[in-house]
């Protein structure tokens, strides 16, 4: 049987470039038996190279592929054709694109817009869902509109932090107090996040977060357990059992996730049955509120004093590394990673077929 040709995108212009490479390696391995995988490495400068052999994905070095620069064209006539640069010589015809890209220029709607212009099927959320899911401020506004419970928060522009930081700190102290968490609005994997317990730390945290994004969000610090639920599907998504993360550091930052490698993952989370049901319901509600597609991981807080469930955020392209909760939760729920990626490709084709039903010319 002819194998479906999948173009796997990884790397990219993001602070999560290295995480993406590790995720893509796991996905490529899971796809390799059933699919014809054409791996495309995107450099930190945004240049595309390929094909990259599976064994080179984790340690992708763009300079090793200087004679394999490639691109796609942003119009439907290209039909998933991958072209070599310079000269635009066709080198591959992809049937489905799988963007295993985390963070900016991959999970924020930009690559999704390009793939929509090229009119090709791709795994994961579309432009709007991706961009809103990436922007924690707009994400929280939509969650609030949907009536989903959240942690109290404030947000500020970088220009205000640059010019009126004392005023901002006073507002945070009055409305949220200490401890509080400071985050860039548009970044994942806990990059640029700090916990502040006093005015000096808060000033430093605001300046740090503003290095990564022009919008900064500040959340009230609560004593919580951190739970995660994986969601899979299109219009009728389903949720996995919840898992729990116990950070090795004070909170689940980038170092705790990917460097120190001492955080504990518990699958399933030890919570009452009614809490499991509520977490699953809220995860699906969050997925639908953003009109996501394919996959998402929804992160929750469970307050230790009142057992209140609060949504932290949604991740529209969760990690697939060896320590990533998204595939682990589905594996525990009876869906191993080979079947999971197979289902994601199927969902991409399904969503694309539904999009093609849209009329793009005026008709009475």
Image (spheres, rainbow, N blue to C red):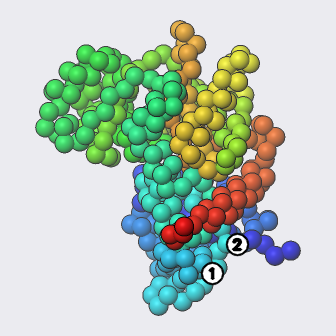
Residue 335 in the image, given as x and y percentages of width and height: 79, 44
The residue nearer to you, when weighing 96 against 195, is: 96
Residue 34 circle label:
none
Answer few, some or many: residues within 10 Å of disc 2's Cα (few below 14, many 20 plus, some between 14 and 19): some
Q: What is the secondary structure assignment of the residue under circle 1? A: strand
Residue 330 in the image, given as x and y percentages of width and height: 73, 41
Q: Residue at x 58, y 13 (%)?
A: 307
Q: Quadrant of residue 3?
A: bottom right
Residue 92 circle label:
1
Q: Quadrant of residue 345?
A: bottom right
Residue bearing mark 2? 5
Q: What is the secondary structure assignment of the residue under circle 2? A: strand
Q: Residue at x 45, y 50 (%)?
A: 131
Q: Residue at x 55, y 13 (%)?
A: 304
Q: Are marks 1 and 2 in contact (CB under 8 Å)?
A: yes
Residue 19 in the image, given as x and y percentages of width and height: 53, 51
Residue 175 drawn above or below residue 289: above
């Amino acid at each position: 049987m002819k194998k479906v040709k999948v173009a796997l995108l990884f790397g990219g212009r993001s602070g999560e470039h290295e995480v993406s490479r590790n995720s893509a390696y796991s996905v490529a391995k899971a796809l390799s038996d059933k699919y014809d995988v054409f791996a495309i490495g995107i450099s930190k400068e945004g240049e595309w190279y390929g094909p990259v052999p599976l064994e080179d994905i984790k340690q992708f070095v763009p300079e090793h592929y200087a004679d394999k620069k490639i691109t796609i064209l942003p119009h439907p006539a290209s039909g998933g054709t991958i072209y070599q640069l310079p000269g635009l010589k066709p080198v591959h015809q992809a049937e489905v694109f799988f963007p295993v890209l985390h963070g900016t220029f991959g999970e924020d709607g930009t690559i999704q817009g390009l793939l929509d212009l090229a009119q090709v099927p791709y795994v994961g959320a579309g432009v709007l869902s991706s961009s809103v899911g990436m922007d924690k401020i707009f994400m929280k506004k939509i969650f609030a509109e949907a009536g989903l419970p959240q942690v109290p928060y404030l947000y500020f522009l970088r220009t205000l932090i640059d010019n009126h930081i004392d005023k901002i700190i006073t507002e945070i102290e009055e409305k949220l107090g200490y401890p509080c968490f400071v985050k860039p609005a548009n970044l994942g994997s806990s990059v640029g996040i700090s916990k502040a317990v006093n005015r000096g730390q808060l000033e430093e945290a605001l300046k740090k977060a503003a290095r990564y994004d022009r919008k900064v969000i500040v959340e009230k610090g609560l004593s919580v357990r951190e739970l995660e639920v994986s969601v899979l599907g299109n219009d009728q998504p389903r949720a996995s059992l919840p898992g729990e993360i116990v950070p090795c550091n004070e909170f689940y930052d980038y170092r705790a996730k990917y460097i120190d490698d001492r955080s504990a993952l518990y699958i399933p989370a030890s919570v009452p049955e009614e809490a499991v049901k509520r977490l699953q319901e809220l995860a699906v509600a969050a997925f639908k509120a953003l009109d996501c597609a394919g996959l998402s991981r929804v992160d929750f807080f469970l307050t230790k004093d009142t057992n209140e469930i609060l949504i932290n955020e949604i991740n529209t392209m969760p990690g697939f590394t060896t320590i990533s909760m998204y595939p682990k939760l589905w594996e525990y729920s009876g869906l191993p990673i080979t079947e999971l990626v197979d289902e994601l490709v199927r969902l991409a084709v399904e969503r694309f077929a539904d999009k093609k039903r849209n009329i793009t010319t005026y008709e009475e």
